[in-house]
Each structure stands twice: as C-alpha cells, then as structure tokens.
Image (cartoon, helix red, strand yellow):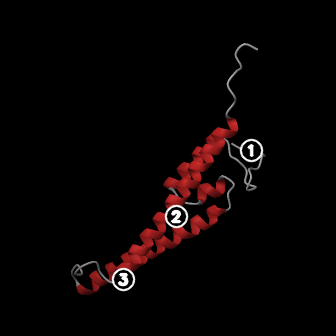
Amino acid sequence: MPIKDSPDIAGRKTPDKATAWACLFTNAFTLPGLGTVAGGNKVGYVQAVLSVLGFGLSLLWALGYLRAWLAAGEQPEGVGPNFWMGLVGVGVYGAAWFWALASSLGMIVSAKAATAQPPPRIGK
C-alpha cells in the first residue's frame, strides 16, 4: 500500500492503516527501525543502527564467553569475561526496540486519525 501524500506537522508522510500495521510487525519481529523507515520516518535509521550495535555488543560477549569455555575445557565460573558488554548490548537493543515500537504505535494512531470521519449529523 502506498503512503499517503499529506505530510504531518514534522514533514513526515502519514501511512495508511495497513502500512502502519505492517511497519509495527516489521519493527517488532525483524529489525527495529526498519518499519519506521518504511513508514516514512527517518529516525528509523537511528533506531536500526542502535539495534545492530546492541546486538553486536551482545554477540561479542557471547563469543568471548564461548571462547573462554572452549579454552578452559569447562564452563567458566560466573558470567564470563566482559559481562558488562553483554548487559550494555541488551540494554541498547531493548531501548531501540521500545523506541521503534513507540514509533510504530504513533503511526497507527496517526493513520486512524487520518481516516476517521466525523459522525453523521442527526436531523439535518
């Protein structure tokens, strides 16, 4: 479905309802920020970069943990090396995910408001 041509106050285009819902599912289940970009909002690029950065930090911690496990021949004590990196990664990814979710919900509200019609007049 194409995006409507009427820009809102910030200069973004308001997607129709079906596009807004597709953007929500894209943000929630693929890459946070990708649905925001598809909905016509450039802040999605920042969301996508943050989500990839958070995932990368978490992956680096997991690989370091696996390397320590393989080097020792047994599971490392505690949380392994560079646990802070994993925590920061999960936090950054989570923040990007929630931000993208909020952006998607905002698109859905805008789409509903753009298609809402006033109730019919009674009596005249």
Q: Residues within 10 Å of mark 2 (few under 14, many from 20)?
A: many
**Residue 4 appears at what percent x and percent y?**
74, 44
Q: Is residue 124 positioned above or below 80 on the image? A: above
Compare marks 2 and 1 and give the one earlier in the sequence. Answer: 1
Secondary structure category for the residue under label 2: helix
Residue at mark 3 = 82
**Residue 5 appears at what percent x and percent y?**
78, 46
Residue 31 visible here: no
> Looking at the image, do the residues carrying marks 3 and 2 touch, with CB atoms under 8 Å apart?
no
Compare marks 3 and 2 and give the one earlier in the sequence. Answer: 3
Left of 35 or right of it: where is 91?
A: left
Residue 64 figure quarter? bottom left
Looking at numbered disc 2 in the image, what kind of residue is underneath it? Ala
Residue 84 figure quarter? bottom left
- At 58% from the left and 46% from the top, the residue drawn is 22
Looking at numbered disc 1 in the image, what kind of residue is underneath it? Lys
**Residue 95 appears at what percent x and percent y?**
49, 65
Residue 4 is tagged as 1
Q: Residues within 10 Å of mark 3 (few under 14, many from 20)?
A: some
- At 52% from the left and 64% from the top, the residue drawn is 96
Q: Residues within 10 Å of mark 1 (few under 14, many from 20)?
A: few
Q: CA distance from mark 1 to mark 3?
A: 47 Å
| Total numbered labels placed on residues in the image | 3
Looking at this rendering, what residue extends furthest in the top direction?
123
Residue at mark 2 = 96
Residue 101 is tagged as none
Q: Quadrant of the C terminus?
A: top right
Residue 46 visible here: yes
**Residue 78 appears at what percent x and percent y?**
24, 79
